[in-house]
Image (tube, rainbow, N blue to C red):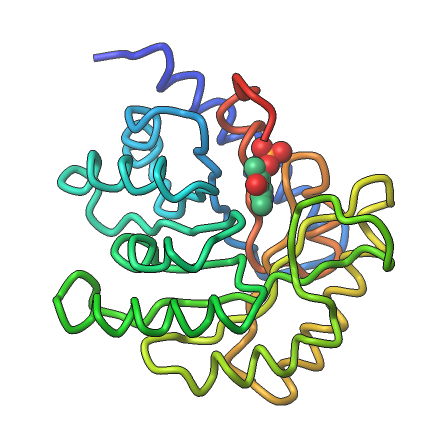
């Protein structure tokens, strides 16, 4: 049984893996970052195709869309991990805690409180079996205009990390960032790497660095990203911006 879309996804996935190999070789990295395929705006059928191609990490940025896809694919995609990477309102914490293995976009105290409560409840009710992995999203912009991409200012990271580390139901994993618009990605990702390194000094378990999208994958690999979030280059261009 051949399906043209599966063939297309296989080719694109291979090319992205090749790019990661090349980027690692260029910086002499021996470890390999984890590829999270960002499936936002694409149908659950694509998630299933990716699963058949061996993908076990997918990313989504809207709760309603992610929750529906997670339910739709639950039976056919055992062991698939959903990474929530978008701006998250506290009142969506309960929903996200039911299907997400990780939230990359934790950026304020109130959200941590809500996620902890939601994860505890999901654990008690058997909707999840492991704590919810949390990454603090850092705003890497030089102070200035808000581009709506969210994130905590670097000075807040330590305080938020301490709160996550003490919260029940949550596991502190590390830092996440989006390269600021209109700035070269690599110096920004270098700042993220430095922040991650000081965080690890206090919380050795928090060793994830989630950085790098289709357009700045190489810069992220060079700056030590452990998790890459790649959408377009695997799935194609999205029908809407976002
Ligand atoms: C959409 C999105 C990505 C993926 O971006 P692409 O350009 O499609 O690779 C990564 N991170 C976040 C936070 C996103 O919203």
**How many marks are shown on the rendered structure?**
0
- Is residue 48 at least partly visible in the picture? yes
Question: Is residue 120 placed above or below 146 in the rendered structure?
Answer: below
For the C terminus, which image quadrant? top right
Instruction: From the viewer's side, name the closer residue of 117 and 223.
Output: 117
> Would residue 20 appear left or right of 62 to someone viewing this image?
right
Which quarter holds ligand 1?
top right
Question: Is residue 9 placed above or below 140 in the rendered structure?
Answer: above
For the N terminus, which image quadrant? top left
- Is residue 18 at least partly visible in the picture? no
Residue beneath the point at 38% across and 56% down: 91
Q: Quadrant of residue 22?
A: top right
> Would residue 191 appear left or right of 130 to someone viewing this image?
right
Residue beneath the point at 44% across and 33% down: 39
Q: Quadrant of residue 160?
A: bottom right
Instruction: From the viewer's side, name the closer residue of 181 and 217.
Output: 181
Residue beneath the point at 58% across and 28% down: 233
Residue 146, given in percent of the width and then of the height, sits at 76, 49
Question: Is residue 221 placed above or below 50 in the rendered structure?
Answer: below
Residue 102, given in percent of the width and then of the height, sits at 41, 60
> Would residue 138 appear left or right of 188 to someone viewing this image?
left
Residue 152, given in percent of the width and then of the height, sits at 67, 65
Residue beneath the point at 28% across and 33% down: 52
Residue 107, given in percent of the width and then of the height, sits at 58, 64
Instruction: From the viewer's side, name the closer residue of 136 and 28.
Output: 136
């Amino acid at each position: 049984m051949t399906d043209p879309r599966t063939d297309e996804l296989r080719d694109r996935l291979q090319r992205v893996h090749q790019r990661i190999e090349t980027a690692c070789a260029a910086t002499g990295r021996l470890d390999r970052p984890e590829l999270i395929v960002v499936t936002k705006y694409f149908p659950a059928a694509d998630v299933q195709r990716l699963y058949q191609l061996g993908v076990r990490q997918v990313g989504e940025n809207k709760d309603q869309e992610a929750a529906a896809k997670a339910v739709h694919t639950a039976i056919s995609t055992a062991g698939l991990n959903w990474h929530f990477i978008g701006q998250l309102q506290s009142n969506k914490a309960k929903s996200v805690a039911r299907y997400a293995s990780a939230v990359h976009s934790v950026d304020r105290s109130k959200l941590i409180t809500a996620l902890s409560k939601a994860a505890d409840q999901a654990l008690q009710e058997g909707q999840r079996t492991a704590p919810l992995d949390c990454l603090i999203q850092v705003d890497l912009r030089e102070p200035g205009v808000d581009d709506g991409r969210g994130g905590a200012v670097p000075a807040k990271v330590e305080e938020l990390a301490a709160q996550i580390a003490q919260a029940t139901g949550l596991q502190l994993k590390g830092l996440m960032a989006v390269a600021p618009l209109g700035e070269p990605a690599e110096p920004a990702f270098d700042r993220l790497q430095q922040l991650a390194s000081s965080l690890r000094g206090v919380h050795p378990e928090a060793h994830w660095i989630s950085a790098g999208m289709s357009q700045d994958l190489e810069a992220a690999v060079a700056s030590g990203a452990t998790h890459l979030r790649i959408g377009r280059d695997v799935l194609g261009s999205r029908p809407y911006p976002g």
